[in-house]
Every structure is written in structure tokens, then in C-alpha cells.
Amino acid sequence: AQSVSQHNHHVILSEAASLELGCNYSYGGTVNLFWYVQYPGQHLQLLLKYFSGDPLVKGIKGFEAEFIKSKFSFNLRKPSVQWSDTAEYFCAVSLSGTYKYIFGTGTRLKVLA
Amino acid sequence: GAGVSQSPSNKVTEKGKDVELRCDPISGHTALYWYRQSLGQGLEFLIYFQGNSAPDKSGLPSDRFSAERTGGSVSTLTIQRTQQEDSAVYLCASSRSAGENYEQYFGPGTRLTVT
């Protein structure tokens, strides 16, 4: 069965540190890839998405992600985190031709001021 | 409304009771999705609607779970004879259509606690 793995469940960083959150999926076909963020007390919001084209995708708030097809990965990065980036981050995959999102278990990021 | 809304935001119920969870999608969105987020788990797909029909109910965990959508808008997820393992956050999402290129917009969720 298709699955999405986020290996880092909890990450704690100081402000200005660089961030990389891992996301791997298991599916050999064409996929669409997403990162969603859930700030404390708020609902899920889309950070960025990849459908096709340039594998380096830029999203909101300085986040970016790189799709590496050979590694089945879509890691999220930010060069310098802020306290306001404290949130839970979810990677999701939809299989090409379908509407169903398969989510990872999420990574809780805490940024220390 | 501006976004997807869900009600109630919190629901505490006794084991064995029935509950109804409501979702109001973004106006004009024809596709609607229900997910469940249990403690320590990712979001688990339950069911999706295109208009009023539900082509994919594959994620419903048991026959105690059902959902309907009327008028191509509001959807209700019903859980009968609730069990403690039903405790979770139930999320609703909508998209302009049910296609892979249409972003899903999520509501705030309903936190269900079964005691």
C-alpha cells in the first residue's frame, strides 16, 4: 500500500537555525506532492505543492521543497527559522489521476526564541 | 463563507451514543472530503463526495460510519454507537473539483472524545 513517511516526529531548533524536514513516499508512479502546516490553534494550510516541472518548489514564508524522484523524497527546507514557524508540518502525496491525499504522521517543530 | 467551517468544534459523547459532525465547504466547491486524525497518526482518508454522490467510501472504518451530502453543499458525517477508538479530530476539506490539480482546503476540525 502507498504510504508517506516523516521520520522526524519532533524537532527543536533555535531561531535562525536551518530546517530540513524529511518526507519519503512509497509509490512507483507519478505523484503530486504537498506540504501543509498547522499552526497552534489553526487549521491546516498549504505551504507548497509540486505537480510537475522544476523539482525545486518555493512556497510561502520562505519555505521550499525539493522533489528527488530517484529517492522518492520531498524534503522541506527553510534557511533560517523564526519563532513563528512553530507548528506541525504534514507531507502529503496524491497519486496522479486521483484526488485522494495520503498524509504522513506529521513533524512537530518548536522554534526557541 | 470565506473558508471551510465545521461544527461542533468539540464534542464529548458517551460510548454507545450516536454523533453527527457537520461540514460547510467553500461556496462553489463541488468536491468534499472527510479525514480523521487520531493521536500520533497522520490524516486518514475516510470518504469523498463529488456533488452529492460518494464515489469512494473506502476509508470508512466500519459500517457505524456514514456520510451524506445534500444540495451539493453541506455534509454530515454520522458515527453510530460510538466507541472509544472513534476519539479523534475529524477534518473536512473541499476543493473546486475532484481532480488531482485542485488544492484541498481544510476546515478547523471537530475534536470528538468518546468517554
Image (spheres, coloured by chain):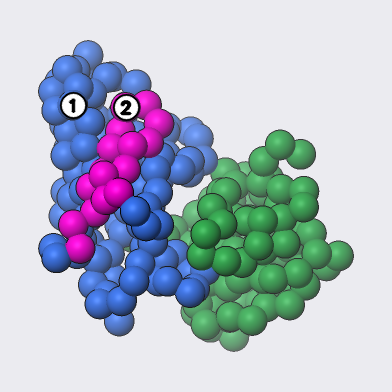
Chain colours: A blue, B green
- In the picture as drawn, the residue positioned furthest to the right comes out as B71
Instruction: Report if residue A107 is visible in the image.
Output: no
The image shows residue B49 at horizontal and vertical percentages of 67, 71
Q: In which quarter of the view is residue A25 placed?
A: bottom left
Dot 1: within a 10 Å radius of its alpha carbon, few (fewer than 14), some, or many (20 or more) residues?
Answer: few
Residue in view at x 21 percent, y 37 percent: A77
Asked if B83 appears above or below A13 in the picture, the reply is below
Instruction: Work out whether residue B81 or residue A87 is closer to the camera in this orientation and state it.
Output: A87
Check contact, mark 1 vs mark 2: CB within 8 A: yes
Residue in view at x 71 percent, y 55 percent: B29
Q: Which residue is mark 2?
A: A62
Q: Quadrant of the N terminus of chain A?
A: bottom left
Q: Which residue is mark 1?
A: A79
Q: Which residues are magenta?
A: A54-69
**Discs 1 and 2 share one subunit:** yes
Q: Chain of mark 1?
A: A
Q: Chain of mark 2?
A: A
Picture disc at residue B104? none
- In the picture as drawn, the residue positioned furthest to the top comes out as A113
Please, what is the three-letter code of the amino acid marked with disc 2?
Answer: Gly
Asked if A72 appears above or below A12 in the picture, the reply is below
Decide which of tag 1 and tag 2 comes sooner along the chain. Answer: 2
Q: In which quarter of the view is residue A21 placed?
A: top left
